[in-house]
Amino acid sequence: MSDVRPWGYGWRSSQSFVIFTATLGLFSETFLYAFIVPILSYMIEDRLELPPSQTQWLTTALLATHGFVSVVSAPIIGHFADKTSSRRIPLLIALAGCFVGTLLLSICPSVWVLFVGRIVQAASGSAGWIVAFATLTDNVKPDHIGKVLGTAMSFVIAGIITGPMVSGALLQLVGYWAAWSAPLLLLAVGFIARLLMLEKNDMQVATSEHASIDEQEALLGANICNSKPDLEQQYPAPPSLGFYRIVLCNIRIIAGLLNTVMFSMILSGFDATLPLHLQRVFHWGTLPIGIIFLGLQVPGMALGPVVGWLRDRVGLRNPTTIGWILIAPLLWMLGIPGTGVDWADNEANGQVIFIIGVVGIGSVAPLVRGAGTFQLIAVTNDLQSKNASIFGPHGGSSRIFSITEIAFNIGTMLGPLFSGALVEAFDFLTMVGTLGQWYDIADVRQY
């Protein structure tokens, strides 16, 4: 039989290229989310010619809109993404939506167009995020999923870090429109990569080097005939049970979602409270405060693949437990400077203690970050190994990641509210001390 493989079959269908394409999508989503932050005030005050007094509330509303749209759209996206066997088509649609949303943001002739652009970008970015993670899990063996997801999370963090840096630098050096060329170019590269990517379904037309298609079909048919009745008899799939009813009644999944919500609340709480706290206690300006936030992110970006490899080797429970236990005293170290304690009251000593706490949290965070997602993947893989059709013919990967997207964005919205209320009612130490006790709520024994 003649070989009907498409052009570039080898590298286009390789696991490495599929992982690269999905990871590029994740990097693009966080890059686009953070890209607008440094130039938003310029867009509001210079392009829209609005008074500076409106900048703060418009910025807050625009960023909050992104989280709200992601929460609302995630289950819808996950539902329809799991209805198709192709991950490439939803990825392309998501990328096209991101391009349209980014273009509307860059033009921004009015406030309502600014919000429409952010809404389109948020929904499309959520779709890209969900389907990209689903693509990774569909194309990576379970014993390597920790390493791959750990590496992907490093690129997610890289997008958060580089987005504001690139936009701020380009705006100052080459101007407004040249700055927007960076995200548009990134989206173009991603679009080309996703067009080239071949999935398992695209490869079904290819011939095997060791067996003909007829032989493969015969073997596959025999295997199905031999195994399917036994599988269905042993693990029946009641059609009345919906996807969310199945997964949300599983205590291990609930524990994983709690982990995601609480970690997201801690990080977003820092965004809302750290700058003012550092200005009050150490009288720091924007540059050292910015460096402090790098201290929270850069160690995690470097250690993400290592922690992923560790999870593949020893499992999820022990690394997650250790991570939450270590975060508690490190959070306390952030709050103790400036409280009147003798050994931390000196400004120099207080700064050293604070920096050690920040770098420590940044280094320990990978043990906790992504644990909820990893847990959900493990549980759903276990359920599908017992009953392959429990979530439908195309599995439930997209819906699983839609749940984690919802959990993360709920934490992102609740974190600033909770942390800000504690700081105003009490003080920064009370706030971080309360957050430090939450590892008891995340019942890591369920992992």
Image (tube, rainbow, N blue to C red):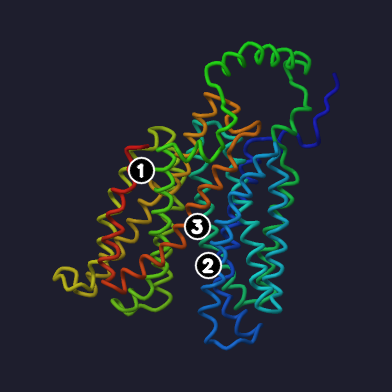
For marks 2 and 3, the one nearer the N-term is 2
Q: What residue type is labelled 2?
A: Ala
Query: Horizontal placement of 420 versus 100: left or right?
Result: left
Residue at mark 2 to residue at mark 3: CA–CA distance: 10 Å
> What residue sits 29% from the left and 62% below the top?
432
Residue at mark 3 to residue at mark 1: CA–CA distance: 21 Å
Horizontal and vertical percent for residue 24? 62, 51
Q: Which mark's residue is nearer the viewer, 3 or 1?
A: 3
Q: Which amino acid does label 3 sit on?
A: Asn
**Quarter that holds the C terminus:** top left
Query: Horizontal placement of 245 versus 192: left or right?
Result: left
Kindly indicate the quadrant of the structure image that contains residue 224.
Answer: top right
**Quarter that holds the N terminus:** top right
Which numbered tag is attached to residue 64? 2
> What residue sits 28% from the left and 76% below the top?
281
Kindly indicate the quadrant of the structure image that contains residue 331.
Answer: bottom left
Compared to residue 312, the image places residue 303 above or below, namely below
Q: Which amino acid does label 1 sit on?
A: Thr
Tell me whether the residue at label 3 lies in contact with that at label 1, contact meaning CB atoms closer than 8 angstroms: no
Horizontal and vertical percent for residue 264? 43, 56
For marks 3 and 1, the one nearer the N-term is 1
Horizontal and vertical percent for residue 84? 70, 39
Q: Is mark 2 on a helix, strand or loop?
A: helix
Which residue carries the number 3 mark? Answer: 409
